Amino acid sequence: MNSMVVLIVGFVVAVIGYRFYARYIDSKVIQADSKRMTPARMYMDGVEFMPTSKNILYGYQFKSIAGAGPIIGPIIAIQWGWLPALIWILAGTFFIGWVHDYSSAVIAMRNDGASFGGLSHRLISPRARLILLSFIYFYLLLIVGAFGNVVVSTAVTLKAAPMAWLFLTIAGVLCGQMIYRWKRDIILTTVVTVLIAMIGIYLGRWIPSDSILGADLAGSRVLWAIAAFVFCYFAAVLPIWRFALPINYVAAYIVFLGLLFGIIGIFVLRPDFTLPAYTSFDIKIGPLWPIMFVTIACGAISGWHSIVSSSGTARQLENELDARPVGAGVMFLEMMLALFALIIAGTIYASANEYAAAVAAGPARVFAAGVAKFLNALGLPLELGQAYGSVMMIVLAITIMQLVVRFMRVATSELLSDVSPVFRNPHVGTLIASALGILLVLTGWWQYLWVLFGGANQLMASLALLLTTAWLMSEGKPTAWTFYPMIFMFITTIAALLVTSYRLLSQVFGGAFKATEQIIGNGVMGFAALFLVVAALILAVEGLKAFGRFRAIRTAGAPSRA
């Protein structure tokens, strides 16, 4: 199979999915209305609710949902063969991914910008709210620990990354100031700020962190962990237009340009896949079903997207008609990023053994090598291309981290504000989230949590689809387009978590681990996987009860609660 065929098929799927399927749902089912007031316009406070141009919001949404997942997942999943991975990326995005992202934004937008906690209380039950909020907080903790490690490890090993990170921050803050305070033209603002960010990438090669800080400080995980969470602290407590929104907007161009020119490089080189289309159903990682479907998370569907779409994007949509390009359209763009990563993994190595040796050193290095190869086809030196690919990884990770800490702050308030009013203070929730994140990164406990990330992430997606289906039923709207994806994701992720739990606990009790930390860490995660399964089953039961109530109301012809 030639890589160009994969890209062309991806383009076709994106066009059909966005222009026909998504348009039909938006106009006929949701019935988006440009005259309806959105929460961003009704409750504009300049902090959480902020009417934002769809052009800016598109970049914000892309960079907010596109973390390292759509890159790492396909690079690992190709061990089952590139064909199963390709089918899941395309079919998952077309039938489930955009549906999940778009509907998560719509349900929050139509309910005054309410979070999933408030929506679950209103649509399902008070008990569902508590369970879902607890699940979400644990889920966010998985993300902040795992991506925090990516940021810290990249800053330690790639000495050019901190300079790029610094210039991205400067460019993002300037972008917010130019757009929202100085009222400058968005095109001028974009060109200026993206250029500043690119200068940072270039300067990082010539002014690495160890030349400024010295080898010891530049290689200190403690230093970069503190720096990462200070960055996230400002993102969490400052108005969204001041820090998180513009930084993610500028960062989107770094990723988008790398993707664009990388795809052009693929068309120049036109490489064939050198790895097999299919290897085996059961490999060392686990069986193709259900494990591959949680290994490739972002890029097909990801529960993280529902958190971004509901708690962030829905509060910034200034027009209901913007939900389709932002919610659905961005998911198809992320699909192309996942296909790009799949092509890299499947074409740049001569054999499966060469790929195995490379991926053992880390999927991030595989991606950086692929970016360097395809940018080199356009004349960019290999060394600079390698640096650009590595910087893409830290940008992908740090911009996700800042939103995770922001959402953890909100979740802390919703979970504990009844215990004490102090938890409503944004600084308190942010400091709690940051302290937990630093603890996970510096102790190394994140690696045990990461085992659960894929399953927990996709389970979050199924719960988001459950909430959306409940809302559609309450409104008397067709539900098949969210109900069947919900069933598939729920069964798949429950199975994946059970497989994960069995493997971990059988190794713990079978004596596979010798070190005490390994025994405790893997044992705790094995039981945590079972806890997530139980929590999800309780939510499913509560959801079925809610479905029954809404069906009875509709049958009786009585007005429903929205």
Image (spheres, rainbow, N blue to C red):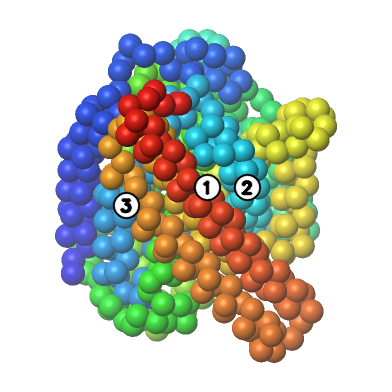
Vertical relation: 319 (above or below) 261: above
Q: In the rendered structure, find residue 39 and report the number of the disc placed on it.
A: none
Number of marks in the rendered image: 3
If you read the primary sequence from the N terminus, does the residue marked by circle 3 or circle 1 appear first? 3
In the rendered image, residue 128, in percent from the top left (x then y), is placed at 58, 44
If you read the primary sequence from the N terminus, does the residue marked by circle 1 or circle 2 appear first? 2
Vertical relation: 39 (above or below) 149: above
In the rendered image, residue 562, in percent from the top left (x then y), is placed at 45, 26
Number of other residues with Cα within 10 Å of mark 1, as a class: few under 14, some 14 to 19, many 20 or more = some
Quarter of the image where the N terminus is located: bottom left
* Residue at x 41%, y 26% (from the top left corner): 560
Kind of residue indicated by mark 2: Ile
The residue to which callout 2 is attached is 131
* Residue at x 20%, y 33% (from the top left corner): 24
Vertical relation: 451 (above or below) 208: below
Q: CA distance from mark 1 to mark 2?
A: 11 Å
Which of the two residues, 205 or 187, is positioned nearer the viewer here? Answer: 187
Q: Which quadrant would residue 398 be assigned to in this image?
A: top right
In the rendered image, residue 381, in percent from the top left (x then y), is placed at 39, 55
* Residue at x 28%, y 44% (from the top left corner): 481
Badge 2 marks a residue whose secondary structure is: helix
* Residue at x 68%, y 82% (from the top left corner): 508
- As drawn, is 4 to the left or to the right of 257? left
Q: In the rendered structure, find residue 542 and report the number of the disc placed on it.
A: 1
